[in-house]
Amino acid sequence: MEKFDVTIIGSGPGGYVCAIRCAQLGLKTALIEKYSTLGGTCLNVGCIPSKAWLEASEHYHRLVHDFPKFGVTFENPAVDIAQMHGRVKAVVEEIINGVSFLMKKNKVMVYQGTGTIKDKNTVKITQESGTQTIESANIVIATGSKPSSLPNVALDKERIISSTEALSLTEIPKHMIVIGGGVIGVELGSVFNRLGAKVTVVEYMDTLIGAMDLALGKELQRSLRKQGIEFLLQHKVTEVIRTGEEVTVTAQALESKEEISLTGDYCLMAVGRRPYTTDLGLENIGIGTDGKGMIPVNEQLQTAVPGIYAIGDVIKGAMLAHKASEEGVFVAETIAGQRPLINYNLIPSIVYTAPEVAGVGATEEQLREQSIAYKVGSFPFKANARAKISMDTDGFIKVLASAQTDEILGVHMLGPRIADTYIEAVVAMEYRASAEDIARMSHGHPTFSESFKEACLAATGGRAIHM
Ligand code: FAD
């Protein structure tokens, strides 16, 4: 029987990053993946294909709506959905192949098959050709998550679909009804809206992207509404019925109790994801799951069984690829005897709509709840020269700083290229910068990032220059 120091079950951004770090640390490492491709949800049916669709659809949208204003015209712009599809697939394949290469380079032993934990040191791998068993001093569970649905709605995967099917649609829907105004709902809603579909988002809460600072959801809704997406907030979906090629969604207004029926050709269920532990054999080692199906872990991300760890979407915390990867590195280093740290407060949330959205640290609502005295500085992109140049004037940067010490406690941003520029806020907060520190740093002109400096100036005595 082959013996390993570490065996990782699941090859998503948690599992494959953990495998690489284990190998770097000299640990003999096995990675088990039940699908034929590595990369998990993120690479196959999540982050990468969704961002590739967002990129392609944004090009089309800008070509039609913005390019003529820049003086660039194009006769009969059109969407070639097959070409778009092909490109998304090619990007996904290239990145997956990159992960396979990294496994070989780092001498990680990859097994294709379903991993089931038999006991604390034994994993059975079920493959098409049969089964084999390996021994391991440590086991890392990185089995990720699957799309959820509403209790009374079954996904038929043809017309009532999850993000997985939405990412491989080969036609542009006429009317897509999106249930859920969270990150996946607004991102995929944006894709199909830009490609010409009518899109209606039905959301139970009174805001979009409800886990983020409330100001972001409001501004995002305003911006997406201008782009043509319709919203029904504070509505509870009571029924979803498919009739032939049509889907009817019935929803009830939370306050008035009035019922509304929407008919479309696709219903995208985007109400969240649930941890995935099927066939894992948790019962063999006495590990249970909590009420949400998550595997409980301690501060070392170790389960109730010593030597068995769990990371990523299958444990508590935000379901994000970069959070899973940080945990993968953390567990590898813990097993190697190091004492790593993860600053969960500084794991950013990002939404890749246009405008993009990002938040890090405390929201205004959290500071209020915790009775922490704070100051706010906000700066709108409509006053930023670079944003005017690129016609990206929606949004703002909001800085929350301690009223006593001026330390930056949270930064919430909505605007152009935010998914890349937000990192300045993370670095500032990691080094415990004050708003004054940032306000005193020279930011190149004209850049989008000047808005961060201006928001810090606004937070420190209302000193924003361009407002
Ligand atoms: P996963 O990526 O889910 O990987 C788990 C792997 O384990 C899978 O490959 C599965 O097949 C395998 N597995 C399960 N059970 C077994 C078993 N018993 N044996 C062998 N293998 C098994 N996050 C971001 O940070 N940024 C984004 O832009 C982003 N966009 C997203 C867009 C969409 C549409 C979706 C659905 C998700 C998105 N996410 C994004 C979330 C991100 O994909 C997940 O948080 C991330 O993939 C979780 O990583 P993981 O390693 O925990 O699990």
Image (cartoon, rainbow, N blue to C red):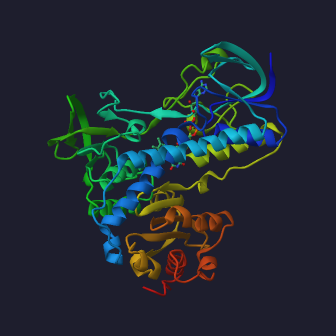
Q: Where is residue 185 in the image (x, y as percent from the top left)?
A: 37, 47
Residue furthest toward the front? 75
Task: Give the residue at x 78% y 42%.
Answer: 333
Q: Where is residue 289 in the image (x, y as percent from the top left)?
A: 56, 26
The correct choice, above or below, for 49 with respect to 273 in the image is: below
Would residue 49 be found to the left or right of residue 234 on screen? right
Task: Give the residue at x 50% y 56%.
Answer: 350
Nearest the eye: 426 or 246 = 246
Would residue 219 be found to the left or right of residue 401 on screen? left
In which quadrant is the C terminus drawn? Answer: bottom left
**Would you identify the image quadrant in which residue 194 lies?**
bottom left
The correct choice, above or below, for 370 with respect to 284 in the image is: below
Q: Can residue 246 be seen in this view?
A: yes
In which quadrant is the N terminus drawn? Answer: top right
**Would you identify the image quadrant in which residue 328 lies?**
top right
Task: Give the residue at x 50% y 86%.
Answer: 463
